[in-house]
Image (cartoon, helix red, strand yellow):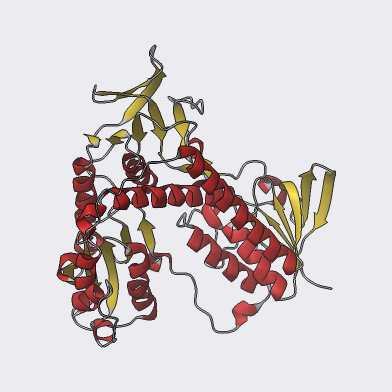
Amino acid sequence: MALRFVIIGGGPGGHAAATHAAKLGAEVTVIERDVIGGAAHLWDCIPSKAMIATGSSLHQVNDSEQMGLTDVVAHLDFDALRDRIQSIEQRLEGQVTQLLESQGVRVLRGTGRMVGPHEVVADTADGEVRLEADAILLSTGSRPRIPEWAEPDGDRILTTRDAYPPKELPEHLIVIGSGVTGVEFVHMFTAFGCRVTLIVSRQQVLPQKDPEVAAALEHEFVNRGVKLFMGARAEGIERTEDGGVRVACDDGRVATGSHALLAIGSIPNSEGLGCEAAGVEVNDWGYIDNNHHLQTNVPHIYVAGDLSGRLPLSSVASMQGRKIAEHVMGLHTREHRHLDYDKAASAIFTEPEIADVGLAEADAFAEGRKIRVTKVPFSTTAKALINNAPRGFVKILSDPATGVVLGGSIVGRHAAELISVIALAVTAGLKVEDIVDSLLVHPSLAEALAEAAD
């Protein structure tokens, strides 16, 4: 009899595990209550990147005079943007659903919960469906975090999920939170012509990133007219009589605008999964602890995606799902590579774009580790000048004794694509000489990678 694999949550981790396990011969059932493909993925990540792409196109068109074009003007059609986002979401959900069906995966629309170590119940519109499981995967993702001092109304006080896109284009948006999500919102709404105030609780935006990278983004924000409240922590939001919002900070400063957006992280969707009934331990933060195989304390029950407490990236969740499917089907007995979260590439889709991978320069110095740091500005490459995008740089960190690439960061157009070269080098243990000796295209932005490695 085929192994019975039940997956609660059809996001990147869930559907990747489902398709790979099905190909390996498992009998797979996926239970999803919101959207196949994942709510955080299709309702957060994809819409935000679509809005950013529109904003970038708008900026490029209206800045086209520097490319030798005249009298070219573009205007935002907010309704058309909304329709475009919806069509992308529907297309991607349809593709994932079709893929699951083509692999023979059973898809149940509803809410899943464990009622025992080997039994799952799906509450669907047609009633309760009981499933016996040899292995279970929990991949229910996360939702926007809402502090006690805020009451989102979906109108003027927004969570991130209310703003993809909002009901109307804000005249003046106050963004609370300067992590990845917060700075992406600042970028997209300034590109749409909105005034923006960003409340930064630390002394730099992107507090977990390279200070040089953060400084480049702060400089761009100031040039765009963004008002930065540095070192201020929001502690209250209220609607004003004129229909706007007022955000009070702990240092006495007050920001006023037409809309406020909460971008202060997320919380895992671990409630209602029946973890206690199955004997699965949930930690104090709501995440489910796991080992390097993504197994919980109950060995046949796995966890992936945001719920795992690892890097909250769609790419990481998908790879986790693949690795879980292989482990469930017994393939871990052959030679294989474990996930190394320290070598995961990530990107921030602002203007300029930001991407990094591997060891960070600040972390290396904090550890007293000897490293070689080389940096090349894009302004020295022909392709960047051709593209009228000379801002930014490539930075590569390597071991001074062996030349092995340890990490890197890129600021500039197409950084998210270019970081893949450094990510491959970090993962494969390549040396800087391997990048230098590669015959890259000329003219191309990738030439800056070889120059930085040299």
State the quadrant of the C terminus.
bottom left
Out of 395 and 170, give the one closest to the viewer.
Answer: 170
What is the quadrant of residue 195 in the picture?
top left
Vertical placement of residue 1 versus 169, above or below: below
Q: Left or right: where does residue 272 sit relative to residue 220?
A: right
Residue 114 in sight from this viewpoint: no
**For residue 123, what is the image quadrant?**
top right
In this view, the residue in front, 428 or 67, is 67
Identify which residue, 238 or 121, lies in the foreground: 238
- Looking at the image, residue 97 sits to the left or right of residue 254; the answer is right
Q: Quadrant of residue 400?
A: bottom left
Q: Does 397 sit left or right of 99 as displayed?
A: left
Q: Position of residue 68 (x, y in %)?
A: 22, 59
Q: Note whether 375 is above or below 184 in the view shown.
A: below
> What residue is drawn where x is 30% and y is 53%?
60
Residue lying farthest to the front in this orientation: 71
* Placement of 198 over or under 438, stated as above or below: above
Percent of width and height locating residue 117 = 74, 55
- Does residue 410 appear in this view? yes
The one of 80 and 184 positioned closer to us in this rendering: 80
Q: Dividing the image into 4 quarters, which one contains the N terminus?
A: bottom right
Q: Residue at x 75, y 71 (%)?
A: 26
206 to 133, vertically: above or below: above
Q: Position of residue 79 (x, y in %)?
A: 50, 38
| Residue that extends furthest to the left in the rendered view of this protein | 380
Count of all numbered marks drawn on residues in the image: 0
Indicate the position of residue 67 as horizontal and vertical percent values: 23, 59
